[in-house]
Image (cartoon, rainbow, N blue to C red):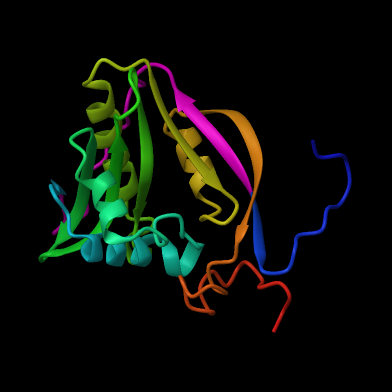
Amino acid sequence: MLTDGYHDIPAGKVASIVTHLEMCERVATRPARVPEGLKLEQVTQPAPDWYRDLFMRIGGLDWLWFSRLGLDDAALGEILHDPQVDLYALMRDGTAHGMVELDFRQPDECELAFFGVTSELIGQGAGRYMMNHAITTAFARPISRFHVHTCTLDSPQALGFYQNCGFVAYRQQVEIANDPRLNGQLPLDAGAHVPIYPLP
């Protein structure tokens, strides 16, 4: 149990505040149109390298997404190829620029496992369009809970976006993990908003 006050973060680690959010019934979605030239398509049996490339371009380099980067092809494929996991990519001219990953593996619920767009699409309405699809798709199945989590390593806009879309925060945690820039999962200049400790 954490006590009040400051707590040291061990060298080689990163710390974040994780906020868990949920939606226990389908909310009304606000109209949103996909930006011109983009189309949301379901991707079945994605290749691990294709997925890692998209994962990195959306969240790895800017926001220190790293949880999937430590998985080998077999472990990553076991998740992505599970029939209870749906992956959608926002496509333009054959290249993916966004992802919606819905995980139905737990009975009666759906986790929005990963969600985001590449930096050039932020602020163009693509996120709202994708979230409308996510909510509609999740609640098309007999679930009673749709949930997601975000953290302070992610975009500062993420938490407010989820709340504006109808998710309600219900829990916060402190997460401490190995800094992915120091173990080679991400380049040293990734996540410039998070200092490397100890500083070089």
Left or right: 36 as drawn, with respect to 181:
left
Is residue 31 visible to the viewer in this orientation of the structure? no
Residue at the image point whose x is 52% and y is 44% from the top: 150
Q: Is residue 195 above or below residue 51?
A: below
For this rendering, which residue is in front, 29 or 25?
Answer: 25
Residue 161 x %, y %: 47, 42
Q: State the extent of the magenta-drawn residues as a range.
A: 17-40
Q: Residue at x 33, y 17 (%)?
A: 108
Farthest bottom residue?
200
Expressed as whole percent of the image width and height from the top left, the position of residue 176 reads 65, 53
- For the residue pair 40 and 72, the one nearer the viewer reads as 72
**Nearest to the observer: residue 99 or residue 196:** 196
Decide which of 53, 77 is in the foreground and name it. Answer: 77
Query: Residue drawn at (60%, 43%), measured in percent from left and top?
Result: 18
Q: Quadrant of the N terminus?
A: top right
Quarter location, residue 145: top left
* Quarter of the figure with residue 83: top left
